[in-house]
Image: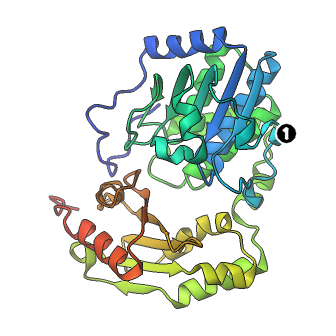
Amino acid sequence: MGVPAPALPAPRAELRRPSEADWQAVLDAIGRAASVDLLAHVLPDGDALGSALAFGLALRQRGVEVRVSFGDDPQVVPASLSFLPGQELIVPCAQVPERPELMISFDVADARRLGLLQAKAESARELVVVDHHTSNAGFGTLRLIDPLAPATAVLVDELLRRLGVPLDEQIATCLYAGVASDTGSFRYAATTAATHEFASRLLAAGVRHDAISRRLWDTQSFGYLKVLAAALERAELEPQAAGGRGLVWTWVPWADLLAHGVPPEQIEGLIDTVRKAAEAEVALVLKEDPDGTLRGSSRASGAVDVAAACAALGGGGHAYAAGFTSHQGVPATVAAFRAAIDAQPAPISD
Ligand SMILES: [Mn+2]
């Protein structure tokens, strides 16, 4: 891995990159296990599910009994990720053993993001946490957490290298979905020369990057366009927020999703449209669940740390992309988020 981009704040001091001993401990655990359960976080994105499926395909090659799951109810693979190879490895939560022999979570920064599978994960004989979130709370019995990695898929690539599993087209496709998702197609600051070198190896393994990009970013239902239109109509710009850096925010009522037949996992990318407002360095989208719970997604372009802001609301993530859950309703939730970004000290210069 190369050096982090200067715009990114330093990772939390207690987070250190995996040592040789950390890698070896995980390889030993995998070598001992006859049965392995791989988990993505709830509402899985390309990095979480791509990482889990890539590793599942590799373990299956090695003759290991392997299952992939995530703790949503209902458990739905987002349409944009249904092309990922290895879907046949995905099982409902009920089929995950009560006390797994070896469980590995991918891209899960907080045990609560395991959803319905949190209890089973916590009773696993070994729980390995493979992740790159600076906010990772450090759960599990073994950890491979690299806050400098642009995607969890990068850590999976290193695991496969150490296991001696070559990148075939299927595995490479899953890893490409992971790294392309988390870097915004290699546009975000966490992208380094090493990230492009990784992508180069994936393309050499046969990845169809053009087809993947169309599935990940350029295909939506007509209903989604209507939900997006309503969300943009509802958007508010607050130029004075975050010490004059500006906040743009909107929200999506559950009724909009119902009216247009759009499943909730399909609006995860809506923030990427809202964040285009030039007048705001911080973007926030609140997505309402049927019970009135609001799921907040935020983005920032460098000077504001949204991981810290979301942590103040009980969530977490990356400095440039983070989220939280709120039960306070839209006005109070936006007010709390605004207060959290307003409270951040102004940078020395930029
Ligand atoms: Mn990730």
Q: Residues within 10 Å of mark 1 (few under 14, many from 20)?
A: few
How far across and how far down the image is residue 316, in percent?
39, 52
Task: Give the image quarter of residue 245.
Answer: bottom left
How far across and how far down the image is residue 116, in percent?
60, 46
How far across and how far down the image is residue 294, in percent?
48, 70
Is 112 rendered above or below residue 74?
A: above
Secondary structure of the residue carrying numbered label 1? helix
How are the residues colored? rainbow
Q: In the rendered view of the protein, which quadrant contains the C terminus?
A: bottom left
Ligand 1 contact, mark 1 (Cβ < 8 Å): no
Q: Is residue 275 visible?
A: no
Task: Give the image quarter of residue 268.
Answer: bottom right
Is 96 rendered above or below residue 260?
A: above
- Mark 1 — residue? 88
Name the residue rendered at 57%, 25% in the picture: 124
Residue type at the position of mark 1: Glu
